[in-house]
Image (cartoon, grey):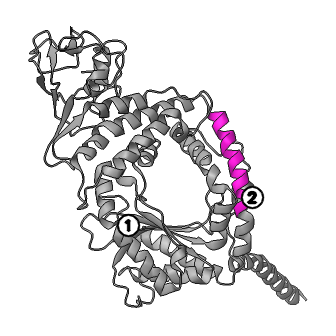
Amino acid sequence: MDTSSSIPAGVTTIGRCAFDNCPNLTTLVVAAPGYKFRGGLPDSCTTTVVDPTLAALGFAAWFGSWNACGIWNAGGPANQQFFSSKSMLEVKSAGKSGGWFSSMSSMEVVLKSPNSAPTGGDVKVNFDEFKRMFKAAKADLLPDFTPPQQQPAALKLKLVALDYQASLFQADGALGPRTAALVENVFIPAARQLFAACVEQSRSMVPEMQKQYHDVRKNHRSIYFDTLQQIRLEPVFPTLQHRSDKLVVDCKQRKRRAAQKATTVIGLLRDAKAVTNRYNMLLKGVGEKTGVPESELHTIGNKGIFRICEKLSLAPTWQPECVQDIVRGAIECKDFTTMVNVLRLLCDLDDGLKITGETGDLKEDIVITRSKGRFGHPTSGGWADIMVNFYFADDPNQHICELQLVHTQLFTVRKKMGAHQSYGIFRAALELCEVVGANPEEGAAPSELEEMVWKDPATLQLQINSPQKHVQEKDAQIAELGAKIA
């Protein structure tokens, strides 16, 4: 059943059709003490079994609309469905007429999920949560290209996300069922709707997005590339690059799992929470063994709910299991010699990738699943680092974390020269171009990217020597032939 054709005009819904975003929601129990329901509904309390073919949060979104003026049912028993416009039912406070919306903050909605779900059990949600959420999500987009995170509605939803994030886990580290249910069943659908609107709007803004992408990239590239050329002159850099390239190939050859076990946002956040402290201790241990000061170990803090939703919404498909950087951090290395030692130690902590086997009594076993060597092949914006994804070998959830190895000079440039502030525009333009099928590189000279790629001097010398050797061989053959003729 497509509820878009049965919900009255003026009613706000989340999602064009359905239960797309909250598969765990099965029952809504609505209690409104002191209110009279006319048209056959029982006083004060009504229960509806939600049809899983209907729109996710159609009911909750309807309650969150300032334009709604009543409750409707589907023509069957009045307490079974609220998703049809066949019969309108009026809700009034006892002894009052009208003005019901602003006075219903005592209403509770129970989100009922299967026990097997991450948020299992019944969770009562105050009506104010729905009112706040859908008021936040209902805001017009700015007419010109604006990164989704800077849209007025996004700024409001960010504040809601911060509230939820602060109360998502209880004192014992377990998920708070009420907030978890709100995140999965209320916040995520609202955020997905906002980002879907941003994507749709961006289809008519491709030239402007490409211009923003190129303008910011030009500035980033000029800042980063000049620094990158200088640090590549360090004598140990070729050794680092060869080890980095080898790690990239080794991970691919071993075909290690490149996706999370958890398949929901709440599941990812739960698994990330379980390993965060351990991750931070690992960074500290690696720093101690390789001479990296604690001030240069950057534990950034876990990725937030809002950015996770944005990242998933601007990807080709919604796949939470592909998000591998919720637990993330960086080790800042003063030179490439230090970075070689850090990379060696990380490999020695992986039984299948050992280089020396010496870990200096650091008792951790990790499994490196993927690596990217960006000092040789920087990103399109000019940034360079070594990225390593891994999980702890004995973690039952095998939650994949991310670690960046960064050079102090590049890290300082990013922090002090303003490159990080403009990165949001660059990233948004890139992600939106890709999701609507536009080429962000259109109009760029191929040489802009080619000149940033590192050329191994040994390989270049081989390429130079090879033609010379070929010419020498031909000269020898000609001389030999001339001698025979003579």
Q: Earlier in the sequence, mark 1 or mark 2?
A: 2
- Mark 1, residue position: 255
Query: What main secondary structure does the magenta stretch of the protein show?
Result: helix
Of residue 361 and residue 366, the one placed in the foreground of this image is 361
Give, as a three-letter code, the residue at label 2.
Ser
The answer, for residue 43, to whether it is visible in the render is yes
The location of residue 140, given as percent across then percent down, is 51, 26
Residue at disc 2, secondary structure? helix
Of residue 94 and residue 436, the one placed in the foreground of this image is 94
- Mark 2, residue position: 222
| Magenta stretch contains residue 220 | yes
Find the magenta span and give its range.
Answer: 206-224
Which residue is drawn at the image coordinates 14% and 10% (left, top)? 38
Check residue 17 in the rendering and tell me which mark sits there, or answer none: none
Q: Point out the image quarter for the C terminus.
A: bottom right
Nearer to us of marks 1 and 2 is 2
Compared to residue 273, the image places residue 179 above or below, namely: above
Q: Point out the image quarter for the N terminus.
A: top left
Quarter of the image where one finds residue 88: top left
Q: Residue furthest right?
A: 486
Compared to residue 167, the image places residue 247 above or below, namely: below
How far is mark 1 from mark 2, CA to CA? 36 Å
The location of residue 385, given as percent across then percent down, is 58, 67
Which residue is drawn at the image coordinates 29% and 60% (left, top)? 271
- For label 2, the crowd category at 10 Å Cα-Cα, with few meaning under 14, some 14 to 19 and many 20 or more, is few
Which residue is drawn at the image coordinates 63% and 30% (left, top)? 144
Give, as a three-letter code, the residue at label 1.
Lys
Q: Residue furthest front?
A: 95
Quarter of the image where one finds residue 392: bottom left
Quarter of the image where one finds residue 112: top left
Of residue 109 and residue 17, the one placed in the foreground of this image is 109
The answer, for residue 446, to whether it is visible in the render is no
